[in-house]
Amino acid sequence: MHETLRALCSRHGIVMIGEPTLLPHSQASWLLTGSSGEKWIAKPNRPEDKSVEMLRSFKMLHPHFRHPLPLTKPEDGYLLYESIPGQVLADGAFDTPEIVETVFEVIGRFRAMMRSLSLVPFLEEKLNQSRIPPGWNSMDSAAPPQSGPRSESVKPMPTRLQIAGSFRWAHQLAASASTLTTSLGVWTDAPIRRFQEQLDRHLSIHIPVVGNNLSHTAMHPEHLLVCENGEIGIVGWHIEPRPRFYMNHTYLAWALLRSEKPALLPLCRDYLSRERAMDFHKDHQLVHALCLLEQLAELLRRPADQRAGRWRDGIALAEALFRECVEAMTEDAG
C-alpha cells in the first residue's frame, strides 16, 4: 500500500517523505507528507465514480465551502488532493443548534450548486471565448490557441436513472439493515416492517423537487471541517442519487446516535415538527427514519472501540424517534 501511494505521489510531482498515516474516522483515507512539509490526502476512488470530475467542475461555480481540488483522474484509482486545514467536526461541538443550522445552510448551498452543474459547459465555453486573441476571425478554420487544458465537464445522469438509483439504494438499505438488526438483536421492537411498507408506497421521495437528487452520501461530522476562518470544508466525497432531504437527515441521524447531549432528541423532533407544517412533511418523516436506519447499520458494523460517543444511549434514542416517524406516517396515511 505504502509503495502504491509513493508511486502515486511521484506521478504528480510530489516527493513523499516518511510513512503515510491513516486518518482518524476513516478506514481508507491516508495522510501523506511532501518534501516541503505540505500535507496531502489519498483515498481509493473507483474509476466509474464521477466525484472527481464533479470536484473539478466546482471551481467554475465558486461554492461557498471548501472542498478538495484533486490532482488525479478517475482512472488513477485514487483521489489525491492537498489537505484542507481545519478541525474535523466530529471532534468538536457537532450537536449545538448553531452548528446544525450552519451545516444546513451549507447543505442548501450544496444543493444549489448541484443544480447548477448543467451550466458548467456553458461557462467553460464563455471562458474559452474570452481567451480568443484580438483580431482572430471566428470564421477562420484554425482554432484559437488555448491557455490551458479544458476540464472534463460533468453531465448529471438523466432524472429517470437518478430516481431508479435512489429507489434501489433505499430498498437495499432497508432490507440489509433489517437483517443486521435482527441478527444482532438490536431494535427488536422497532416497526421496521411497517416502515418498509411505507417505503414501498411513497415513491415521491426519489423524485427531485427541482434539479436533481445527487447528494453527498456521507454529509455528517466525520466529513465536515471547521476551517480557521469559520468556513466549512466538505471531504469524504462520493456523490450518488439519494431521496429528498437526505443530507439534512443524515446529519441529524449521525449526531443523534453519538451525541452526549440529551437536548439533541428534542432538536430532531423540533425539526420534524416544523417540517410537518410544511409541504413534503411525510417525505421528511420517511427519509429521517431511513437515515436513522442507515446510520444505525453503519455504527453497528464498526468495532465497538470505534463507536464514538454514548452510542448505546444513542441507539435507544434513535429507536424511539424511528418509531415516532413510522407512527406519524401511519397516522397521515389513515
Image: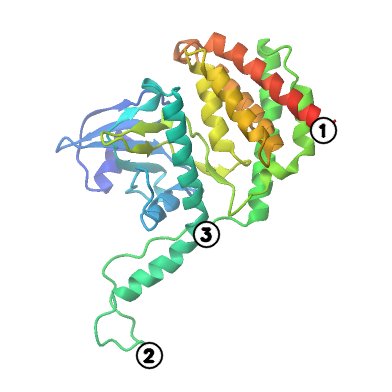
As drawn, is 237 to the left or to the right of 294? left
Disc 1 to disc 3, C-alpha distance: 38 Å
As drawn, is 244 to the left or to the right of 2? right
Residue at the (31%, 42%) spot, across then down:
81
Of the numbered discs 1 and 3, the one sitting upstream in the chain is: 3
Compared to 133, does 267 lie above or below?
Answer: above
Mark 1 falls on what kind of element? helix
Disc 1 to disc 2, C-alpha distance: 63 Å
Residue at the (20%, 37%) spot, across then down:
38
Q: Where does the image place residue 230, in percent across and percent down from the top left? A: 31, 35
Front in this rendered view, residue 208 or 101: 101
Of the numbered discs 1 and 2, the one sitting upstream in the chain is: 2
Give amino acid for label 2.
Met
Residue at the (41%, 49%) spot, across then down:
55
The quarter of the displayed image where residue 132 is located: bottom left
Q: Where does the image place residue 103, in percent across and percent down from the top left? A: 44, 34
- The answer to whether one can see residue 301 in this image is no
As drawn, is 62 to the left or to the right of 118? left
Name the residue carrying label 2.
Answer: 139
Mark 3 falls on what kind of element? loop
Compared to 71, does 123 lie above or below?
Answer: below
Q: Where does the image place residue 322, in percent across and percent down from the top left? A: 67, 21
Disc 3 to disc 2, C-alpha distance: 29 Å
